Every structure is written in structure tokens, then in C-alpha cells.
Amino acid sequence: MMYWNTTVCSEISVAVIDDHDVIHAGIAVWFKNADPPIRLTRCYYSTNSFLRDCPRGPTDVDVVVLDLELTSRHIDFSGVEEVITAGHRVIVFSHIETDEIILKCLDLGAVSYVSKSEGKEHLIDAIYAAESDIPYVAPRMAGAMFRDRSLGRPSLTPREKKVLVAWFQTDSKELVAEKLRISPSTVRTHLQRVRAKYASVGRPATTKAGLVARAIQDGIINIDDL
């Protein structure tokens, strides 16, 4: 399913963090043939080297594609969190397909999780969606989120709930960012993930009014709080 408008989408800039040259080379070919265009700005072998160049987001990088295991074959959740906390939109691109790992990355704030076995089409679609702040749920991610649901209610993190309520009570994402002392891109990421979680349990909410209705139904906020 395509989530972008090809008539208005400008070139997307993407940084890739992976410790394998073959992944860098393969993704470069995928991007070269993408339509709308995707520009591979830089390739990195570690989150530290990326953050030295891009300590705060967004800069000239719209989306970061990040592997979970860098150099040591150790799952680096802290590195994922550091890149997300810096304000970057992160898509985790990993061979790991374990539900707990996928859900952990989403809880840390990744906008999407794509298994390397899911390949080119899902990664490209996830990038287009992320740049447009639209939810994209790849099959492995959908399975993990589906099995994590409880009575049709998505499992929202405390931070997601806080951002959601603040957004309901203000006129813009910029005001939410100022109130919570986070970047506007981080606000957009949280709201994108909330929408993705509602969609995964069969209760889509594509508008702000729709999200308000879902939040009231689930006891996240009361009408008197609006």
C-alpha cells in the first residue's frame, strides 16, 4: 500500500547505519531506482559516528535506517534510543524478527520496524511514510503489535499518552514540543506511532478528531480535560 503523493513528494534524504558494506551497497541501488527519488546522504558503521555528524535532527537527513546489531553482534537498544532522542525519524532495519525485540524498538520511539527478509518494497514504503509522518506497518511489525494487543486496545507508552493528551489540548505540534521540551519531529513520531498502533488493532484514527474519540473510549482522556 502506497502512502505518498508522487506529484508533491520532493527528494527524501536518508542516512543508513549498518556495519555491513553489502547492506550499504544494496540500499544505494534500491534508492537509485526509487520513484519518488530517495537520496542516500551518508553511510555509517555506528550510531556514534552518525551522531557526531548529526547531533540534532532534523538536519539534512529526513529518515535514518538503522540496524540493531553493530560490530559486536550485540543488540544496541541504547544506540537506537540516542538517535531517536536526538530528534531523528528512525526505521529499524534488522534480520531479527522476535516480537519482543520489535516491540522494544517501537517503545523506544522507532517510527517503523522492517525485517531485512521483507526486503526492498517494505523498506522503501516505510521511508516514504516516515518522511510524510504517516504510519507504516510492515508484516513482521504488524504481527508483533497484533499479538501484543489487549481487548482491542493498543499498548501506548506513558510518553505517547502524554504527547497525545498535550496535542489534544493545544493547537499545534510545535506548542506540544515547547510544552514537553522535545522537538516537533519527536512529537510527530509519537503521534505517528499512536496511529499505527490503533490501526494494528483494527481501530484506525486518521484524523485528530478520530484520535480524540479513541482516547476517550479508552479512558486516556476525559471530555472535561479538553
Image (cartoon, rainbow, N blue to C red):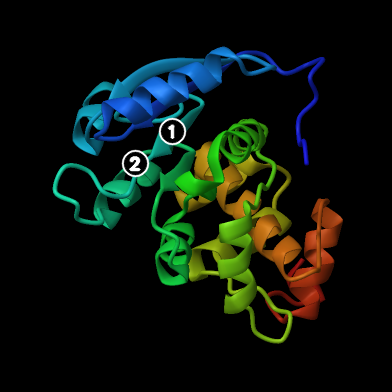
Residue 145: give x, y in percent of width and height. 60, 68
Real-space CA distance between mark 1 and mark 2, rounded to the nearest whole angstrom: 9 Å
Badge 2 element:
helix
The answer to whether 167 is drawn above or below residue 2 in the figure is below
Side of 132 relative to 43 (left or right): right
Is residue 133 among the parts visible in the rendering? yes
The residue lying toward the viewer, choosing from 58 and 175, is 58
Residue type of the residue flagged with mark 1: Val
Residue 1: give x, y in percent of width and height. 78, 41
Quadrant of res 161 = bottom right
The residue lying toward the viewer, choosing from 20 and 55, is 20
Residue furthest out toward the bottom? 151
Instruction: Name the residue tied to disc 1.
Output: 64
Q: Residue at x 26, y 47 (%)?
A: 79
Quadrant of res 19 = top left
Residue type of the residue flagged with mark 2: Val
Is residue 60 among the parts visible in the rendering? no
Q: Residue at x 79, y 19 (%)?
A: 6
Label 2 Cα neighbours within 10 Å, binned few <14 / some 14-19 / many ≥20: many
Marks 1 and 2: which is nearer the front?
Answer: 1
Badge 1 element:
strand
The answer to whether 75 is drawn above or below residue 21 in the figure is below
Q: Which mark is residue 182?
A: none
Q: Residue at x 20, y 35 (%)?
A: 48
The residue lying toward the viewer, choosing from 5 and 171, is 5
Residue furthest out toward the left? 72
Q: Quadrant of the C terminus?
A: bottom right
Return the disc, 1 or 2, that comes first in the chain's sequence. Answer: 1
Instruction: Name the residue tied to disc 2.
Output: 83
Label 1 Cα neighbours within 10 Å, binned few <14 / some 14-19 / many ≥20: many
The residue lying toward the viewer, choosing from 3 and 174, is 3
Is there a contact, CB below 8 Å, between mark 1 and mark 2?
yes
